[in-house]
Image: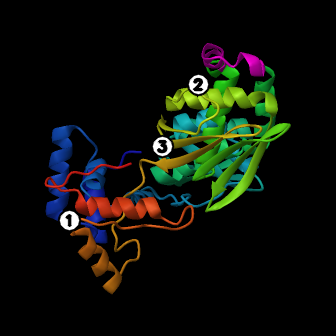
């Protein structure tokens, strides 16, 4: 999609979004850095992406759609195969009769529209959207895997050789942790938890199986049941990722590792606890891309806020932040540390 800068300028000024001086300054910077003026306007905070997308939609004469919070029907989503959707930033989101509405970043990409029209045998109605909308829609391709998840785990579990109790040596466990089926199971567990926006993953062995639960919005939900034979492999893999002792099975261990893709970056805290039926694992998922909050944003007002600030300035003492899982303890502590984080203060976290 390419709207001429001067045409864009006329519409932006007419809409009163920014001043002529601000636009000319952004245009000058765009030419100097060889970027699009739209990208500079967004980067400088002069205009937000949604307002710009709406304006472009108006200029091009197409409708604008916001899919950031929309859940798309899997049947409609699958009309456009995931590889095409990702490579061309185009997503099907609504179908009525022979009409298929598609969200795009470039509604002038006629080649892609024509390709989908022939493949689906439907009339394509292009709609302009934002990067965030496309990313939210693309994530939903992963969510359609939920129904198939149990089958994936069962297929991968077949390739795992069970470990006998008497040969749980360090090297044996390391070999199992590096086997492809074990790696795929752990990776899928983590990816699925991120897609479900879970805060914790609980992997608990019982007598004949392994129960996996996700904590979503503070409540634990059963996610899946795995065969008992995969338990040792999963534990070994997570221990390797967390740099924990592979041959220690009788004492609790704590560690951490990170997972990172183009879409998300998470820090994972790991706790391993021995139980009668094996080792139980709890993993806390902490998004590193999450926006930091200040105390006012968290809801502290008036006297309560004054007390916190007063006690933060004291050279000695302790502030306790308590509450159930997902109540915001870590977020509150980070907000407090942001206040304390000055060159004259040494901070250590445990």
- Mark yes or no: residue 339 visible: yes
- Residue 136 is situated, as x and y percent measured from the top left of the image, at 55, 51
Q: How many neighbours does mark 3 have within 10 angstroms: few (below 14), some (14-19), or many (20 or more)? A: some
- Residue 150 is situated, as x and y percent measured from the top left of the image, at 79, 38
Please tell me whether mark 1 or mark 3 is closer to you in this view. 1
| Label disc, if present, on residue 266 of the rendered structure | 3
Identify the magenta region.
160-176
* Vertical order, 317 against 122 (above or below): below
Residue appearing at x 76%, y 22% in the figure: 165
Q: Which numbered disc flags the more N-terminal residue, 3 or 2?
A: 2
- Mark yes or no: residue 58 visible: no
Residue appearing at x 69%, y 57% in the figure: 220
| Label disc, if present, on residue 246 of the rendered structure | 2
Q: Under tag 3, what secondary structure?
A: strand
Residue identifier under label 1: 315
Q: CA distance from mark 1 to mark 3?
A: 33 Å
Q: CA distance from mark 3 to mark 2?
A: 23 Å
């Amino acid at each position: 999609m390419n709207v001429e800068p001067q045409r864009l300028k006329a519409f932006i000024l007419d809409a009163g979004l920014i001043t002529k001086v601000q636009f000319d300054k952004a245009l000058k910077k765009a030419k100097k850095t060889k970027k699009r003026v739209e990208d500079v306007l967004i980067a400088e905070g002069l205009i937000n992406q949604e307002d710009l997308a709406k304006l472009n939609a108006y200029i091009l004469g197409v409708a604008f759609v916001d899919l950031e919070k929309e859940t798309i029907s899997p049947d409609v989503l699958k009309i456009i195969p995931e590889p095409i959707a990702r490579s061309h930033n185009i997503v099907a989101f609504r179908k009525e009769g022979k009409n298929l509405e598609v969200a795009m970043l470039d509604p002038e990409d006629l080649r892609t529209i024509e390709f989908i029209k022939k493949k689906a045998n439907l009339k394509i109605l292009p709609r302009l959207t934002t990067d965030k909308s496309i990313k939210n829609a693309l994530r939903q391709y992963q969510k359609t895997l939920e129904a198939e998840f149990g089958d994936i785990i069962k297929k991968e579990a077949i390739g795992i050789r069970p470990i006998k109790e008497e040969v749980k040596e360090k090297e044996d466990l390391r070999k199992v942790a590096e086997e492809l089926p074990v790696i795929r199971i752990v990776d899928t567990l983590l990816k699925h938890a991120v897609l479900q926006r879970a805060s914790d993953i609980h992997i608990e062995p019982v007598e004949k199986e392994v129960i996996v639960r996700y904590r979503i919005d503070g409540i634990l939900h059963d996610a899946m049941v795995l065969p008992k034979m995969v338990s040792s492999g999963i534990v070994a893999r997570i221990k390797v990722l967390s740099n924990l002792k592979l041959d220690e099975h009788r004492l609790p261990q704590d560690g951490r590792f990170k997972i990172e893709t183009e879409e998300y970056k998470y820090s994972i805290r790991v706790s391993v606890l021995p139980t009668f039926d094996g080792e139980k694992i709890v993993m806390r998922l902490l998004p590193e891309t999450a926006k930091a909050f200040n105390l006012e944003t968290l809801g502290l007002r008036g006297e309560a806020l004054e007390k916190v600030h007063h006690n933060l300035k004291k050279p000695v003492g302790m502030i306790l932040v308590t509450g159930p899982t997902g109540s915001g303890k870590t977020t509150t502590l980070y907000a407090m540390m942001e206040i304390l984080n000055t060159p004259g203060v040494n901070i250590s976290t445990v």
